[in-house]
Image (tube, rainbow, N blue to C red):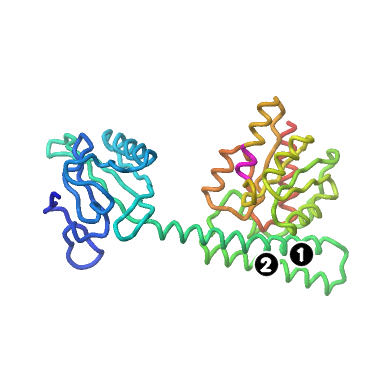
């Protein structure tokens, strides 16, 4: 194994350590993609001086490595992730960065590649995202139910109790956003006050399909929209596809995290069905506690028109429904 005498890495304090002492894996690659030098940590992932860098990797990992080298060959820096064995750590998720190396005359002479173990980061992020979803889902039912109560004729003391319930639930949603790092999204509805009644506009009785695996959430949407729409509810993505093929709808409200088939997969299948049957494009809004940018982007890519975060107020939902239906009819 070749030794990189001049390269060092710093632990963030004190003197830099020789690159062999780093927990980060480092490779120095030639223009042909073969390893010229490698530190101990990188040797645990795989590769020795003279060997092809990506030997022994899966097909997907080799393809990602080839794309990264192509980017670096054109002067850019590429970052990708692979699942790989890493010595005593076992199977890990590694984030690999590839950068070009130039000689004193500015000519490309090779590449530098480094890898760090991001398994714990990814597992922690997934745990927090799931925790956020599981808490926000019943919280949504509380917020919306309290808002529905406030809109009904109540004794002053009862109206005050409903107002306290909704305000407390919204405050809890705000704490979740701060503690769990809930990212902002297309609809920051958890922080919105219920600023007066929004009267549904008369445009005929709408037909709305709601897919959500939580019975409380399905019932809350029925109560909010039932005054001006016929609402059909299902509890997973596959049932949503089957219902959509059975009858026409003016709007689909789709949760993301559901059993059997998730909402993103269901939206994608609905768009394919519409294209295959030459049907008009029905507006679809994601009605979900999954508000991170990756889910918002995936929803849009699948064919969703809007991403509405739970918990939301009845007025926000009614306004979004009216906007989407009117835009579709225009």
Quadrant of the image containing the C terminus? top right
Q: Which residue is mark 1?
A: 146
Q: Position of residue 187 (x, y in %)?
A: 62, 51
Is 88 drawn above or below residue 263 in the view shown? below
Closer to the camera, 81 or 8? 81
Residue that lies at the very extreme toward the top in this rendered image: 278
Q: Position of residue 284 (x, y in %)?
A: 68, 40
Q: Which residue is mark 2?
A: 169
Which residue shows up at 72% across the image and 34% down it? 328
Q: Is residue 167 magenta?
A: no
- Left or right: residue 167 versus residue 162 is left
Residue that lies at the very extreme toward the bottom in this rendered image: 157
Q: Where is residue 33, by image quadrant?
A: top left
Q: Is residue 265 magenta?
A: yes
- Left or right: residue 90 versus residue 122 is left
Q: Overall secondary structure of the magenta stretch?
A: helix
- The span shown in magenta is 263-268
């Amino acid at each position: 194994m070749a030794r990189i005498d001049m390269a060092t890495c710093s632990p963030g304090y004190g003197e830099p350590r020789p690159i062999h002492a780093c927990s980060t894996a480092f490779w120095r690659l030639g223009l042909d993609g073969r390893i010229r030098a490698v530190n101990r940590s990188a040797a645990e992932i795989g590769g020795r001086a003279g060997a092809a860098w990506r030997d022994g990797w899966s097909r997907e990992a080799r393809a990602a490595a080839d794309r990264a080298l192509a980017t670096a060959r054109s002067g850019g820096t590429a970052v990708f992730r692979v699942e790989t064995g890493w010595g005593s750590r076992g199977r890990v998720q590694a984030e690999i960065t590839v950068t070009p190396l130039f000689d004193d005359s500015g000519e490309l002479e090779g590449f530098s590649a480094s890898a760090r173990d991001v398994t714990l980061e990814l597992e922690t992020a997934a745990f927090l995202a799931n925790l956020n979803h599981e808490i926000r889902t019943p919280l949504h039912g509380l917020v919306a139910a309290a808002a529905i109560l406030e809109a009904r004729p109540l004794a002053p003391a009862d109206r005050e109790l409903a107002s306290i319930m909704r305000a407390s639930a919204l405050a809890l949603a705000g704490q979740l956003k701060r503690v769990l790092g809930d990212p902002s999204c297309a609809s920051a509805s958890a922080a919105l006050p219920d600023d007066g009644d929004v009267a549904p506009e008369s445009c005929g009785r709408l037909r709305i399909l709601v897919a959500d695996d939580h019975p409380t959430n399905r019932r809350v949407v029925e109560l909010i929209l039932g005054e001006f729409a016929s609402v059909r509810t299902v509890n997973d993505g596959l049932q949503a596809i089957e219902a959509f093929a059975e009858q026409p709808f003016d709007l689909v409200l789709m949760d993301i995290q559901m059993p059997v088939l998730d909402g993103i997969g269901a939206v994608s299948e609905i768009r394919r069905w519409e294209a295959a049957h030459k049907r008009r494009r029905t507006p679809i809004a994601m009605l979900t506690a999954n508000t991170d940018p990756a889910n918002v982007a995936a929803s849009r890519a699948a064919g969703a028109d809007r991403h509405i975060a739970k918990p939301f107020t009845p007025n926000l939902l009614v306004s979004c429904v009216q906007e989407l239906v009117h835009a579709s009819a225009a």
